[in-house]
Image (tube, rainbow, N blue to C red):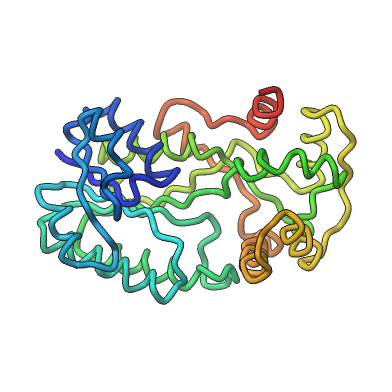
Amino acid sequence: MRIAVMGATGQLGRATVDHLIGQVGAENVVAVARTPSKASDLAARGVVVRAGDYADVGSLRSAFDGVDTVHLIPTKAMPRERVQQVQNAIDSAKAAGVRRLVHVGIVGTDVTNKFVIMPYLLYAESAIVTSGLAWTLLRNAYYAEPIADWLPEIVRMGTIPYPFGEGSHAWATREDMARAAAAVLASGEVDGEILNLTGPAAHTVEELCAIVSRVTGQTVTHRDASVQDYIDASIADGEPEPFARLLATLYDPVRDGLTSFATTDIERITGKPPESMESFLGRVWRA
């Protein structure tokens, strides 16, 4: 049984491949990348590396040849492009005789979610479910890593300018989500399920400020932040304004209460609970 991972040279893709190697053997993992040379280290470990581009149907059909399961990790394109990309992948998978698709989405997926990428996610999940192939939908929590990277600036600002309102979120580490994805890909025991891969607890910004204060030993105080406060902080941190405004829409569903939950899906799938925010941020800060 061969498993193909799209975007295998990205952060999530590479971490997923790492876990898959340990579970099914390198020879049964196909790393699909637009630039195969970037996966030379994976090839050296025995992984099958193939060229594949969501925009190139011919490359996808070749990449999926002899593959049982395809892991669809979306690109960073805008929604209209992503819609065509996922349809290309579905069509190519069916043509190549693929049996199962596993898609990576986002928690809080709902028609009322105002995140700018939501039109793609709604289309992709529906298209996969109605494709006639076996499927599992993974809805990932927001990554904990950007908060860890932002810790020095958070300490300098003395606050976390997330415009959450009264909402909360159960951040999880990329490592935990990759570990869960690999378990799903390797087992096939959760076909037909929608899994929400979250951390062990949902936190408000006030609770997150308290966590950061404890792990850094610095005072980080919760202050209600507006969307513009977040945009301004992102621009000050080096993000272009258009991208900062796009990122800000990620927090609309949090503010609207669509992500204020945590699940045990990661532990159920892998047998090991996800790392808490306090443990993860503390570990990164000490390092």
Q: Which one is nearer the viewer's eye here, 106 or 286?
A: 286
Question: In the current view of this chain or complex, which residue is farthest to the bottom?
Answer: 80
Rendered position, 258 above or below 144:
below
Q: Judge left or right: residue 177 versus residue 50.
A: right
Rendered position, 213 above or below 32:
above
User: Which residue is depicted at the point 33% across and 40% down?
Assistant: 184
Rendered position, 136 above or below 17:
below
User: Which residue is depicted at the point 39% across and 58% down?
Assistant: 74
Image quarter of residue 3: top left
Horizontal and vertical percent position of residue 224: 86, 57
Horizontal and vertical percent position of residue 266: 47, 36
User: Which residue is depicted at the point 33% across and 37% down?
Assistant: 17
Rendered position, 277 above or below 165:
above
Question: In the current view of this chain or complex, which residue is farthest to the front?
Answer: 37
Horizontal and vertical percent position of residue 96: 11, 58
Horizontal and vertical percent position of residue 87: 28, 70
Quadrant of the snapshot with the N terminus: top left
Q: Judge left or right: residue 282 versus residue 49.
A: right
> How many numbered marks are there?
0
Quadrant of the snapshot with the C terminus: top right
Image quarter of residue 278: top right
Q: Which one is nearer the viewer's eye here, 182 or 133?
A: 182
User: Which residue is depicted at the point 88% across and 53% down?
Assistant: 223
